[in-house]
Image (cartoon, rainbow, N blue to C red):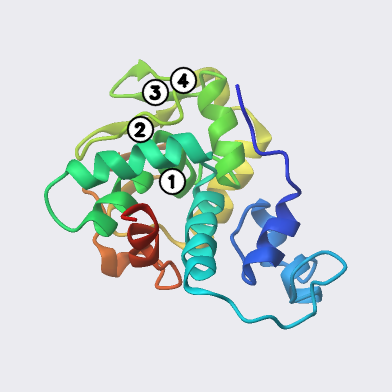
């Protein structure tokens, strides 16, 4: 299975903002973006003019890194969104938000998307009472997601759920913290997702 092994903090610094790839560390003053708010590498602090293509590429890379998706899978998700009804950019973000690993992260079953993906891969998540270990599985509105019985004792999952409860859950999710379960009520609207994502540039890049 292919994986992105790049250092998480370097990815955040390259995009110039927090992508929340390191779990609770991103909410502390140990965050690398807080300490060094410039791109990594020898020429990270040098100011350079960015072309239109460069801006589109950076927008695409940022979305990929946020959701932890590799290039081929991201391109396939884009083509799926392109065929869907409605605005392509909105459909793309909704498809990424509907991934099982992302839903598990949003519900607090992992401190980061990478950790939530590992919980899914290790048979720790049930969808409508059935074990699903495919991170890219598309969750549908009305699906019930819960932590498997044998995984509920894990301290990292308990800690992640408590931290997520303190920050609050998105409106499109109904989460029972004590029961470690929840319902995916609906796909999120664009207004409910981060405004720092520029999906229109991603559409422009792939439309060429």
Q: Mark 2 touching mark 3, by CB under 8 A?
A: yes
- Quadrant placement of the N terminus: top right
Please tell me which residue is depicted at 31% across the width and 33% down the height of the picture: 138
- Residue 98 visible within the image: no
User: In terms of secondary structure, where does tag 2 sit?
Assistant: strand
Please tell me which residue is depicted at 49% across the width and 20% down the height of the picture: 149
| Disc on res. 126 | 3
Circle 4 Cα neighbour tier, 10 Å, few/some/many (<14 / 14–19 / ≥20):
many
Give the label, 4 or 2, closer to the camera. Answer: 4
Q: Which residue is mark 1?
A: 107
Q: Which residue is mark 4?
A: 133
User: In terms of secondary structure, where does tag 3 sit?
Assistant: strand
Label 1 – label 2 distance at C-alpha: 9 Å
Mark found first going from the N terminus, 1 or 2 = 1
Label 2 – label 3 distance at C-alpha: 6 Å
Q: Position of residue 10 (x, y in %)?
A: 75, 58
Q: Which of the two residues, 52 or 161, is positioned nearer the viewer here?
A: 52
| Disc on res. 55 | none
Label 4 – label 3 distance at C-alpha: 9 Å
Q: Which residue is mark 2?
A: 145
Mark found first going from the N terminus, 2 or 3 = 3
Please tell me which residue is depicted at 39% across the width and 66% down the height of the picture: 201
Q: Which of the two residues, 126 or 61, is positioned nearer the viewer here?
A: 61
Label 1 – label 4 distance at C-alpha: 17 Å
Does residue 129 lie above or below 175 as drawn? above
User: In terms of secondary structure, where does tag 1 sit?
Assistant: loop
Give the label, 1 or 4, closer to the camera. Answer: 4
Total labels drawn: 4
Q: Mark 1 touching mark 2, by CB under 8 A?
A: yes
Mark found first going from the N terminus, 1 or 3 = 1
């Amino acid at each position: 299975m292919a994986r992105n092994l790049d250092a998480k903090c370097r990815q955040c610094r390259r995009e110039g903002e927090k992508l929340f790839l390191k779990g609770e560390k991103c909410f502390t003053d140990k965050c690398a973006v807080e300490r060094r708010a410039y791109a990594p590498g020898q020429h990270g602090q040098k100011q350079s003019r960015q072309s239109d293509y460069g801006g589109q590429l950076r927008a695409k890379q940022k979305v990929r890194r946020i959701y932890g998706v590799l290039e081929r899978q991201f391109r396939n998700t884009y083509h799926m969104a392109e065929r869907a009804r409605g605005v392509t950019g909105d459909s793309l973000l909704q498809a990424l938000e509907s991934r099982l690993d992302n839903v598990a992260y949003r519900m607090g079953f992992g401190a980061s998307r990478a950790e939530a993906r590992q919980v899914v891969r290790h048979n720790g998540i049930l969808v409508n009472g059935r074990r699903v270990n495919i991170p890219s599985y598309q969750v549908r509105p009305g699906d019930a997601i819960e932590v498997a019985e044998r995984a509920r004792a894990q301290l990292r999952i308990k800690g992640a759920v408590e931290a997520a409860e303190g920050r609050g859950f998105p409106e499109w999710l109904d989460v029972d913290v004590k029961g470690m379960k929840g319902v995916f009520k609906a796909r999120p609207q664009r207004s409910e997702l981060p405004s720092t994502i520029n999906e229109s540039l991603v559409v422009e890049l792939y439309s060429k």
